[in-house]
Image (cartoon, rainbow, N blue to C red):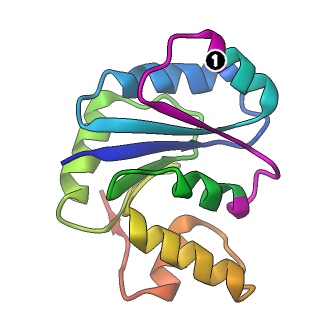
Amino acid sequence: MAYTALLFHPIDTSFDVVQTQMRVLQTLSDCKQIVVCVDTSSMEQILKTQIVKTTLVTAQTGSYDDLIRCLNAVRQEEVIVITDSEAITSLQMDTLYQHLQTYPAIRACDGVEGYDTRLLVFSLKHALEHGIVIESCAQIVADLTDTPIQVL
């Protein structure tokens, strides 16, 4: 089993934050893909570094439309969405992934959540198509499915 890590930060997040999180994720054997939503200047900086297992998606608006475009690049059945600029640890990611293998919607802490990819894509697309206000991924998954969010 494996997962994709999706870094979805506000457009003004510093490149150093993204690069630090990418370094941690690249060392994790269960993380098979890293999808990063970035602005054009950060993309140019990332392309100059040695990147492995990374897919870059250009941010257009910083909205949930961008998140859907990022999710379209995800190749794994589970996705861990990282929206916080705080440091992530390999232990935190491993623990979240272990729980994600048995439950489809998990919140590890502010800004780090894991989902069955199909569940998250369905929820976000449904909300956008029907004009439902999206406050967070966890809120929309809980509201549109019968899947309560498990909190670690």
In the figure, 127 relative to 63: above or below? below
What residue appears at the point 46 percent right and 51 percent down from the top-left corner? 74
Q: Quadrant of residue 85?
A: top right
> Is-magenta flag for residue 76?
no
Q: Quadrant of residue 148?
A: bottom left
Residue 24: percent from the left, percent from the top? Answer: 39, 23
Residue nearer the viewer, 23 or 75: 75
Reading the image, the residue beneath label 1 is 47
Q: Quadrant of the C terminus?
A: bottom left
In the figure, 144 relative to 117: above or below? below
What residue appears at the point 73 percent right and 24 percent down from the top-left corner? 42
Residue nearer the viewer, 124 or 48: 48
What residue appears at the point 32 percent right and 37 percent down from the top-left corner? 32
Q: Secondary structure at mark 1?
A: helix
Residue 106: percent from the left, percent from the top? Answer: 35, 62
The answer to whether residue 131 is left or right of residue 122 is: right
Residue type at the position of mark 1 = Leu
The answer to whether residue 71 is left or right of residue 26 is: right
The answer to whether residue 86 is left or right of residue 57 is: left
Residue nearer the viewer, 70 or 84: 70
Q: Which residues are magenta?
A: 46-65
Residue 150: percent from the left, percent from the top? Answer: 32, 68
Q: Residues within 10 Å of mark 1 (few under 14, many from 20)?
A: few
